[in-house]
Image (cartoon, rainbow, N blue to C red):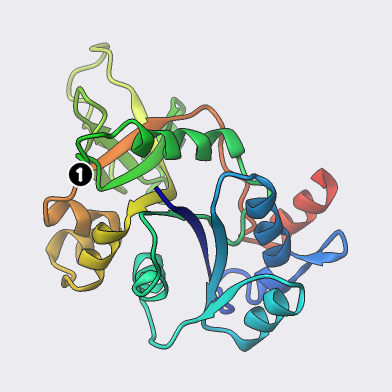
């Protein structure tokens, strides 16, 4: 089973333009992310896929592997699908370009899902962690997920799910972390399917997979991601480094 990491890397960012090319301890954010993925030793290969000549040149000039997006894409899944369409690979792990401090243990758990999935019932695997503060639960920027008894996603939403009509019944609220491991075929299917109502309403690409019958296995983790979305996040990252 061949497993690769793909790091989608857009140059533009609404909240923090060119964040992936910012300096983080003498290297750019995107280069640190690429090197961290390589140094995890979890993958047979690592690629950055980008719409930016600047990011492409940054990776290649430092001895890395990059793929140039040909088309414009609305989602990370679309960008990754185009990149891997002609690669010989079984499992594709999406590593976020703005998260240079990779959680190796969480990625190991995602990969283990496929190593144990002998019947190939899993199309995607992703991560979630429990949230308890009411503000966090109600925040629409925090995507919530509900799962069945076997850990497969039933629905993702920016709204509070499940709605707490009854209190004290043991409901746990789980926040989704947008790191995925895909079977290649699931990615290609996504690429060729249209966006329909649920995805369009919530602006959550994972709903397209559910709407078309794909199975998403959710793995619980206690480790939150460390993303660089603002200049303040970058300063925190510099101090952490």
Nearer to us in this view, 48 or 72: 48
Q: Which quarter of the figure has residue 205?
A: bottom left
Residue farthest along the right direction in this orientation: 26
Q: Position of residue 188 (x, y in %)?
A: 26, 67
* 212 relative position to 115: left or right: left
Residue at image point 35% right, 39% down = 114
* 187 relative position to 135: left or right: left
Residue at image point 34% right, 28% down = 173
Q: Residues within 10 Å of mark 1 (few under 14, many from 20)?
A: some
Residue at image point 56% right, 74% down = 13
Q: Which residue is mark 1?
A: 215
* 127 relative position to 150: left or right: right
The secondary element bearing badge 1 is classed as: loop
* 4 relative position to 159: left or right: right
User: On screen, 149 above or below 35?
Assistant: above
Q: Position of residue 167 (x, y in %)?
A: 24, 16
Q: Position of residue 24 (x, y in %)?
A: 80, 61
Q: Position of residue 52 (x, y in %)?
A: 58, 84
Q: How many marks?
A: 1
């Amino acid at each position: 089973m061949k497993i690769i990491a793909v790091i989608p890397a857009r140059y533009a960012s609404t909240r923090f333009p060119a964040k992936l090319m910012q300096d983080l301890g003498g290297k750019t954010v995107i280069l640190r992310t690429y090197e961290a993925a390589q140094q995890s030793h979890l993958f047979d290969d690592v690629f950055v896929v980008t719409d930016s000549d600047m990011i492409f040149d940054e990776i290649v000039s430092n001895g890395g592997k990059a793929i140039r997006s040909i088309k414009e894409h609305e989602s990370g899944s679309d960008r990754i699908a185009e990149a891997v369409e002609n690669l010989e690979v079984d499992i594709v792990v999406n590593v976020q370009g703005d998260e240079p401090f990779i959680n190796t243990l969480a990625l190991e758990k995602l990969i283990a899902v496929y190593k144990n999935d002998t019947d190939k019932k899993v199309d995607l695997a992703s991560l979630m962690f429990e949230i308890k503060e009411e503000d966090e639960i109600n925040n629409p920027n925090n995507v919530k997920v509900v799962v069945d008894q076997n850990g497969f996603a039933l629905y993702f939403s920016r709204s509070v799910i499940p709605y707490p009509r009854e209190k004290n019944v043991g409901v746990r609220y789980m926040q989704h972390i947008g790191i995925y491991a895909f079977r290649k075929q699931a990615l290609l299917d996504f690429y060729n399917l249209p966006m329909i109502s649920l995805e369009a309403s919530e602006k959550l690409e994972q709903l397209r997979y559910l709407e078309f019958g794909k199975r998403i296995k959710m793995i619980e983790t206690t480790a939150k991601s460390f993303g660089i979305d603002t200049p303040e996040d970058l300063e925190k990252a510099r101090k952490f480094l």
